[in-house]
Image: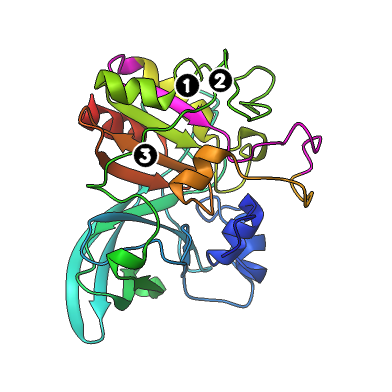
Amino acid sequence: MSDRLSRRRFLTGAGLTGGALMALGACSSVGGVAAPAAEAAPQLVHLFSTDHVIAAGVSQRIPFAVVAGPNLELPDEAQIAVVVRRGSEVIERTTVVGRVVNHDHVGDVDPNHQHADLLRYYALRTTLPEAGVYDLEADFGDAGTGRLPIQAFERSSVPLLLPGDPFPSLVTPTFDDDAGVDPICTLAPDPCPFHTESIDAVLADGRPMAVLVATPALCQTAYCGPVVETMIEVAPRYPSVVPTHLEFWANAGEVAGNYADPKLRLAPAVEALGLTFEPSLFLVDRQGIVVDRIDNIYDATELDASLAAIA
């Protein structure tokens, strides 16, 4: 996978190709997702990079989406039965709940209710015991079964930080020192507030961190979602956790926001973290150990639970 992976290329590389990508970009009465005309059964699509990201023997979050067929309607927060197999061996049977990002409603609704103006996603947490290819099967009853292949790699061949790894002490951009990144935040119209302290200082103080690598300028629509905005909403509930935002690119200002420019460079912290995609959120405890990594999309409910776990 190229280290110049844009969000669109990330989604394409993760399985959102052709008709599926077009379907995921539209709305319909079928759970907010347009079904491909040529496909009757529900389809599952990866919402994570498939290239040396899932490690064997480590509990990880595996996000995916459902492209519903014409015979399936998914209500908000729909739960689906999931089986993880390797060949004929059943690794796990569980249920996963639909998660969605913020949506404006007209009329009286539960204030805790969330609904997708983008798309629904599902996040399976499981441990794939050995390196190899597994099948994730989602049962939709009479509408059929959706299947998704997942490859787990030996932990030693996964270059990313995983739960249990120490987070590196990095000098990262702040409002006082851009550390070679311009701009330090592409959120518009104003930068986000998560650029007050460098990561090395937070680690030295023994405070928990939520480190979000994302490019908000590219995060307004599609499956990446408004991850920085969601952090702005939820983080104040956990004052003991230091939220830190890192831009993926070092010189977006130099190329005038042209993310296809060949002169675009990765930010130093992103290179140090070994990331070839974004967004990615690292939850780091008081000992500086990665408790969890959440790739791609998350909603306010999932983020709330993640911050509570390290607060």
Q: Give me the disc on residue 192.
A: 2
Q: At x 61% / y 19%, what residue is drawn? A: 191
Magenta run includes residue 256: yes
Total marks shown come to 3
Which of 24/232 is in front?
Answer: 232
Q: Is residue 130 above or below residue 113?
A: below
Residue under numbered circle 3 = 282
Q: What is the quadrant of the C terminus in the image?
A: top left
Along the viewing direction, whichever of 124 and 81 lies nearer the viewer: 124
- Sequence-wise, which precedes: disc 2 or disc 3? 2
Q: Secondary structure at mark 3?
A: strand
Q: Position of residue 184 (x, y in %)?
A: 61, 26
Left or right of 302: which side holds 175?
right
**What secondary structure is the stretch in magenta mostly built from?**
loop
> Which residue occupies the foreground of this view, 150 or 299?
150
| Alpha carbon separation for disc pair 2 and 3 | 18 Å
Q: Nearer the viewer, residue 39 or 195?
A: 195
Give the residues drawn in magenta, as a range: 237-258
Residue 6, visible in the rendered structure = yes
Considering the numbered disc 1 on the image, is that residue within a helix, a strand or a loop?
helix
Q: Are marks 2 and 3 in contact (CB under 8 Å)?
A: no
Q: Which mark is residue 181?
A: none
Disc 3 residue type (three-letter): Phe
Quadrant location of the N terminus?
bottom right
Residue 109: tell me if it is visible: no
Check disc 1 and report the residue beneath it.
232
